[in-house]
């Protein structure tokens, strides 16, 4: 089994190859193509195609990598989903299961994806040459990431629409706007001016009866969607060279706005009531399985695991980068962002509740209703409201674009690894243009008058049980097929001079990969499936028909089926008995060690040097 092998075999050492020069962001390194220089124990490896790329691109410095990963992980879910889940699950008590789930499930999966990408220097599909039986995991990640790209940029299109509308004074969804006086006469109205603006002017959902009645395209939204995809195309056109510079703005600007909102919100009347509500403790809620299930699902939204974007971003990292340190920095930074964003949001909610004289819990909602109804209404109550609205929706756009950077990089990297003939500048630009055009066209049904119903359906099922299942297969596959001992050894090889704290942390992660993380994932998967069976999907008062729910389940099943399907393909490509086929299919391909061989000379020298 690969889990028991080591790179330093007894016998005469392999002849050393001359070291390659150190490189920067577009530096080209020559790979080690001689598979005999790093012998692999066990049965002879199966034949392999040449390595998918003859060079590796690397980040100029570690800060671009860290900011790119942080921008990818910190997305819209940190702004609209995390504060709402705190509100729905007992306030601050929700932080306890959230951080427990992050430690036991989120951190180990995050480290696993970063380590796979950094060691293999390939995308989310080709990286499974470490264990060809598990190639379906990469395909499943590609499908999940593609589904997210289809609907995620629709949110950015909504934000563009609101951004353009924010350059009016008064804001068109405020009580001061002409025609809104009727909705603002008293606080007990059935609908607010902000809700009317969202449903009628932005979505046009009043002209649709449900999934089967999409209605006409909302052309202003369609133009915003086109603009969003044009921005994504040009920002990712030159790969990590251009996006690595962009993240200095897109990844840091949201933090400046959140900090500004926290400071300004603290000066508003009623803001402390919102903060108290956010941090309130209801210890009895810890007995509810729903609280733990919500915490586990939020970990996937907060850390971005399971989509392949982390594998792709880490594949551009230097081989000897301390992947454990990067994991801790990024995961802690992402979780803290979710926590501190809640202060900005609930201080505004507290002020809004104070203005309209209702409890704080009565002005919050989930999903798009929170981000495009409650937040704009709260912003309209602030002094200089157009300025705050512009800053807020610029923040949403940058958060969304940063996340799409990671998804698009993961998709393009996966395709280029599988089809290396496309790996030149002109063909890569054509591929990126084809992807952005396809996703834009697929997103058009989501900007029709009934598009919000399709948006909710895709959002619910594309990243639900399918993502949890893929992560479970990944954890079990690395632990029991590739070998958790070998995987830990690979991480040690990358870190080289491993400090003692890293060794202790690696022991903790090993225990999680082998037992705790799979058990938690399986429990969350069971709870998610039970919830889908017990609770039909709704959007407001509209209950989804059975055929709509079945269609959503099929999206999740399509993602899950890739793992067993491609495992069968890998077994059919081998010969002999089923046992022999399985043993061959879990053996790493020679190019797996060849990719790591770009810096492996230093690893071998370090591992053979006497201990101090």
Image (cartoon, rainbow, N blue to C red):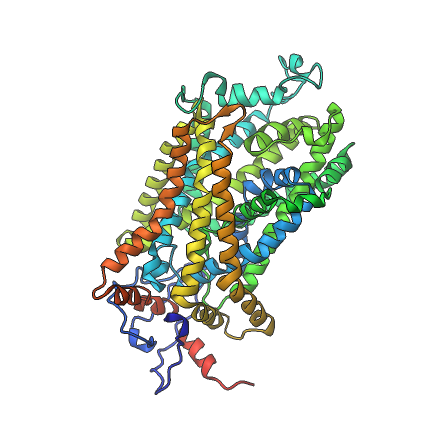
Q: Is residue 55 in view?
A: yes
Residue 477 is situated, as x and y percent measured from the top left of the image, at 40, 60
Task: Look at the image and tell me in which quarter the N terminus lies.
Answer: bottom left
> Would residue 476 be found to the left or right of residue 351 on screen?
left
Choose top left, top right, bottom left or bottom right for residue 474: bottom left
Q: Which quadrant of the structure image shows residue 187?
A: top right
**Side of 314 where 341 appears, left or right:** right
Whether residue 241 appears in this view of the structure is: no
Q: Is residue 346 left or right of residue 396?
A: right
Give residue 300's position: percent from left, percent from top.
Answer: 52, 48
Vertical order, 368 against 484 (above or below): above
> In the image, 493: left or right of 180?
left
Q: Nearer the viewer, residue 312 or 212?
A: 212
| Quadrant showing the C terminus | bottom right
Q: What number of labels is visible?
A: 0
Q: Residue at x 61, y 49 (%)?
A: 98
Q: For the point 31% across and 43% down, which residue is it?
A: 430
- Examine the rendered structure and indicate whether residue 467 appears above or below residue 212: below
Q: Within the image, what quadrant is residue 83 found in?
A: top right
Residue 179: percent from left, percent from top: 62, 12
Choose between 506 and 397: the one closer to the eye.
506
Q: Classify 180 as above or below 80.
A: above
Report the residue at 30% width, 73% height from top: 35
| Relative depth, front residue between 372 and 231 | 372
Q: Is residue 538 above or below residue 513?
A: above
- Name the spot of residue 563 as percent of width and height, x first: 35, 52
């Amino acid at each position: 089994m690969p889990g028991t092998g080591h790179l330093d075999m007894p016998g005469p050492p392999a002849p050393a190859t001359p070291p390659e020069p150190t490189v920067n962001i577009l530096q080209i390194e020559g790979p080690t193509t001689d598979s005999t220089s790093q012998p692999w124990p066990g049965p002879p490896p199966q034949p392999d195609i040449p390595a998918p790329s003859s060079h590796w691109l690397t980040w100029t410095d570690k800060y671009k990598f860290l900011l790119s990963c942080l921008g990818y992980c910190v997305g819209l879910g940190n702004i609209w989903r995390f504060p709402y889940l705190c509100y729905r699950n007992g306030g601050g008590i929700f932080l306890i299961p959230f951080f427990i789930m992050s430690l036991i499930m989120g951190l180990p999966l995050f480290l696993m994806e970063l380590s796979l990408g950094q060691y293999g220097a390939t995308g989310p599909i080709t990286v499974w040459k470490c264990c060809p039986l598990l190639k379906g995991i990469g395909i499943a990640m590609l499908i999940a990431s593609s589904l997210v790209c289809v609907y995620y940029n629709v949110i950015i299109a909504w934000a563009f629409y609101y951004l353009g509308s924010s350059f009016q004074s008064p804001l068109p969804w405020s009580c001061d706007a002409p025609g809104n006086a009727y909705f603002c006469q008293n606080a007990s109205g059935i609908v607010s001016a902000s809700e009317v603006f969202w449903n009628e002017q932005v979505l046009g959902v009043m002209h649709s009866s449900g999934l089967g009645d999409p209605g006409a395209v909302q052309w202003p939204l369609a133009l915003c969607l086109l603009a969003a995809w044009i921005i994504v195309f040009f920002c990712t056109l030159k790969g990590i060279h251009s996006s690595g510079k962009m993240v200095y703005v897109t990844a840091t600007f949201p933090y400046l706005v959140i900090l500004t909102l926290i400071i300004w919100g603290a000066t508003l009347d009623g803001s402390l009531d919102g903060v108290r509500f956010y941090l309130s403790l209801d210890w009895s809620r810890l007995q509810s399985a729903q609280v733990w299930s919500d915490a586990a699902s939020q970990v996937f939204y907060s850390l971005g695991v399971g989509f392949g974007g982390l594998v792709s971003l880490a594949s551009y990292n230097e081989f000897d980068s301390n992947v454990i340190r990067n994991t801790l920095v990024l995961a802690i930074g992402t979780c803290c962002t979710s926590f501190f964003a809640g202060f900005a949001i609930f201080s505004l909610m507290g002020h809004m509740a104070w203005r309209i004289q209702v409890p704080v819990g009565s002005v919050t909602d989930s999903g798009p209703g929170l981000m495009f109804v409650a937040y704009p209404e709260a912003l309209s109550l602030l002094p200089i409201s157009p300025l705050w609205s512009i800053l807020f929706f610029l923040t949403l756009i940058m958060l969304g674009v940063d996340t799409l950077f990671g998804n698009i990089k993961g998709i393009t990297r996966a395709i280029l690894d599988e089809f290396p003939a496309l790996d030149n500048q002109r063909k890569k630009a054509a591929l990126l243009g084809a992807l952005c055009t396809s996703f834009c066209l697929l997103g058009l049904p989501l900007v029709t008058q009934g598009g919000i119903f399709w948006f909710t359906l895709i959002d619910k099922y594309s990243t639900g049980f399918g993502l949890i299942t893929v992560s479970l297969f990944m954890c079990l596959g690395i632990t029991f097929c590739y070998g958790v001992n070998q995987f830990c050894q690979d991480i040690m090889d990358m870190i080289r001079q491993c400090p003692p704290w890293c060794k202790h942390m690696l022991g903790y992660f090993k225990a999680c990969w082998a037992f705790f993380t799979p058990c938690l994932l399986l429990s969350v998967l069971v709870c998610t499936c039970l919830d889908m069976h017990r609770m039909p999907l709704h959007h407001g008062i509209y209950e989804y028909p059975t055929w709509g729910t079945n269609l959503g389940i099929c999206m999740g099943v399509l993602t899950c089926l890739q793992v067993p399907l491609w495992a069968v393909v890998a077994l059919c490509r081998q010969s002999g008995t089923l046992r022999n086929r399985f043993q061959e299919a879990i053996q790493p391909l020679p190019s797996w060690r060849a990719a790591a061989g770009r810096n492996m000379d230093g690893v071998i020298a370090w591992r053979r040097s006497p201990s101090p």
